[in-house]
Image (spheres, rainbow, N blue to C red):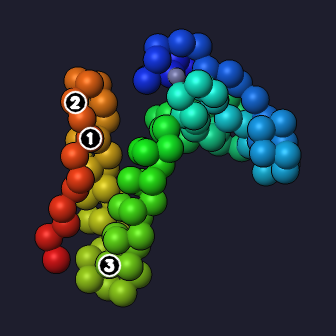
Amino acid sequence: MICPYCQTQAEFISSKDFYGTNYRTNLYVCRPCDARVGTHGRGKTPLGTMANAELRELRKLCHARFDVRWKFGKVSRYIASVFLHVIFTLVRTNIAFNAPLRPITFVH
Ligand SMILES: [Zn+2]
């Protein structure tokens, strides 16, 4: 897997070697960018796209906001997941075009 930030080959490593704990998964890691993505189980298929610390934090914020909504029945989990997909796509598009990341404002 190529790191989307620096375009170099990511390191393939077990969770035990990376975290020191065996989560029975692997990771693709780019240490200079602090970017990583886990895999499905012990395989090589990534769970998604590599994320650096900033994008991981954005993903956590998105999950925190939307998990509350679907867990309390404001929207269905499906609609919340579609919305998250759109947001992640926008963030990836910003990265792909090398544009600065802008804060995302949520409408309540
Ligand atoms: Zn990188």
Say which amino acid is labelled 1. Answer: Leu
> Where 57 sits versus 75, above or below?
above
Residue 83 at x, y = what percent? Answer: 25, 58
Residue 75 appears at what percent x and percent y? 26, 77
Tag 2 near tag 1, CB within 8 Å: yes
| Closer to the camera in the image, 40 or 10 | 10
Question: How far apart are labels 1 and 3 at the CA level?
Answer: 24 Å
Please say if 100 is above or below 86.
above
Q: On residue 101, which mark appears?
A: 1
Check disc 2: other Cα within 10 Å, few if <14, some if 14-19, many if 20+. few
In front: label 1 or label 3: 1
* Mark pair 2, 1: CA separation: 6 Å
| Residue ID at (47%, 48%) | 56
SS at circle 1: loop
Q: Position of residue 67 (x, y in %)?
A: 40, 73
Whichever of callouts 1 and 3 sits on the residue coming sooner in the sequence is: 3
Residue that badge 2 annotates: 99
Q: At x 84% / y 50%, what residue is drawn?
A: 21
In this rendering, position of residue 67 left or right of residue 3? left
The amino acid marked with disc number 2 is Ala
